[in-house]
Image (cartoon, rainbow, N blue to C red):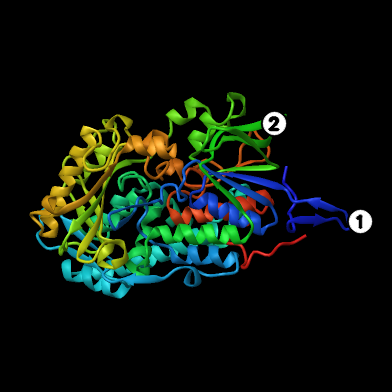
Amino acid sequence: MTPPRASGPETVTSTTRRKVPARRAVVIGGGISGLAAAALLARDGFAVTVLEQRTQLGGRAGSWEQDGFRFDTGPSWYLMPEVFDHFFQLLGTSADAELDLVKLDPGYRVYSEGYDEPVDLRADREANIALFESIEPGAGARMRKYLASAEDTYAMAIRRFLYTTFQDLTKLAAPDVLRRLPKLARLLIEPLATFAESAVRDRRLWQILGYPAVFLGTSPYAAPSMYHLMSHLDLADGVLYPKGGITEVISAVERVARAEGARIIAGAKVERIVVEDGVATGVVHRDRDGGQHTAPADLVVSAADLQHTEMQLLDREHRTHGAAHWKERDPGPSAVLVYLGIDGPTPGLLHHTLVFTEDWKANFGAIFGDDRHVPDPASIYVCAPSATDPSVAPRGSSNLFILVPLPADLSIGKGGVDGAGDYEVERIADRAIDVVAERAGVPDLRDRIRVRRTIGPRDFADDLNAWNGSMLGPAHTLKQSAFFREKNASTKVEGLYYVGASTIPGIGLPMCLISAEVLLKRIHGDTSTEPLPTPLGATS
């Protein structure tokens, strides 16, 4: 059943003029998708309550502070800026009004094993084409073609594949899609790694083109080459940074949600979704003191990981997907995260730095293959935001965030503060710190550590109810992308919907924002494929 569109806090019927209470929506989870869903639903006239189990909002995109150092605990890349701006425009504002955005130039640095000098990726397309040409003569012309294809594919994805519920697949048979069918067939079948290697031969360059698969929770050997569109984002559009960090994005989405009237309750641990006669009617949760409450609802939206929602919050008969389904799905990678407060500079690092191993097949095979284990050596990512933003570290100090991708394996354990995590987590962290010390030109890096904290796969599971300790969400393999991904509404429970990285359109902060808009479309039976007009206006 499609709920009627609400017109404000109260709906007035045209026949009797009798005031009808606003429909109640309960959102489970205060990450970016839950907050965004709350903002759009409230704007649309629902009375919205958000229940977040932690005392801090943001979910994976959290924040942690100690001794003057402040760390984003999860996402750190600000890509697809037009998606953020469109979301804020729906609510009558803009990204520029809500955030202090700066463009990074270079956008990021890459170290490849076997090469002493790094490759610095610039802030615009032409500079990067020239860079590729300087490394591999002839690559510039091929990259111009590659990036043109990436831009075209990205534009088509925005028009046809990202802002749709996939309820009406005939909408995908638009003329622009039909014209591209031969190209799309190749992009869906051919792995990203193969597609990238056809454009450039230098290992450093095809690693740069293949690495975006990690943002999608998968391997370049498994991701469809459709996702070469990601290269348009970093190599052509450039990389932005919101001053203060990604936590400022969360604060901005929270701010607009509250401005629209959403009520947000932190420290509310959800235990069960109440289903009566096949309809979602409320959410049972406990407060910080252990008291049990039921939030009544006409509509329930879960922004929690879908596997947790289905397997823990619903009775067996109400699950769209049972245990057998999840055994066949890929949860995506986990990671060990390391937060370091460092005395002094780290001169070899930029705001974003990637360190790649030479044998990528072995590296990604360890994470995503049949025999999954911790890769050694491992490719790592380092974020040094203090290079851009002095507010995140004391004067004269450096703030480092290190990410080591790993299999989603809970046995790797938990992290801790000052080396107090489980043995394997701290061992992985030590190895990564040594790599950073070498690349950053800071041989005494360990001696300069003032603040240290680690996070492991078990932390993702315990703190965020992440399936198998996944750091991102289900991998974007072909079988888990677009209309093959889990849908955003229950097939068993009327009035139960989903947002976030587990559902369409997928992983990442921009995708989670889009999922909130796709939710609104689903509720109103809107099967269009393009973004909604801005601003979002209440209609009767």
Label at residue 377: none
Q: Is residue 201 visible?
A: no
The three-letter code of the residue at mark 1 reads Thr
Question: In the visual, does 172 lie left or right of 379?
Answer: right
Whether 373 is drawn above or below 253: the answer is: above
Residue at image coords 48%, 49%: 31
- Residue 141, position in %: x, y? 27, 70
Residue nearest the observer in this picture, 129 or 314? 314
- Assign a secondary structure to mark 1: loop
Q: Which residue is mark 2?
A: 278
- Quick one: 255 or 513, which is closer to the camera? 255
* 196 versus 98 height, above or below: above
Q: Are marks 1 and 2 in contact (CB under 8 Å)?
A: no
Q: Residue at x 32, y 73 (%)?
A: 124
- Please report whichever mark, 1 or 2, sits nearer to the chain's N-terminal start: 1
Residue type indicated by callout 2: Gly
Looking at the rendered structure, which numbered label has been put on residue 15? 1
- Position of 114 with respect to 497 (left or right) is left
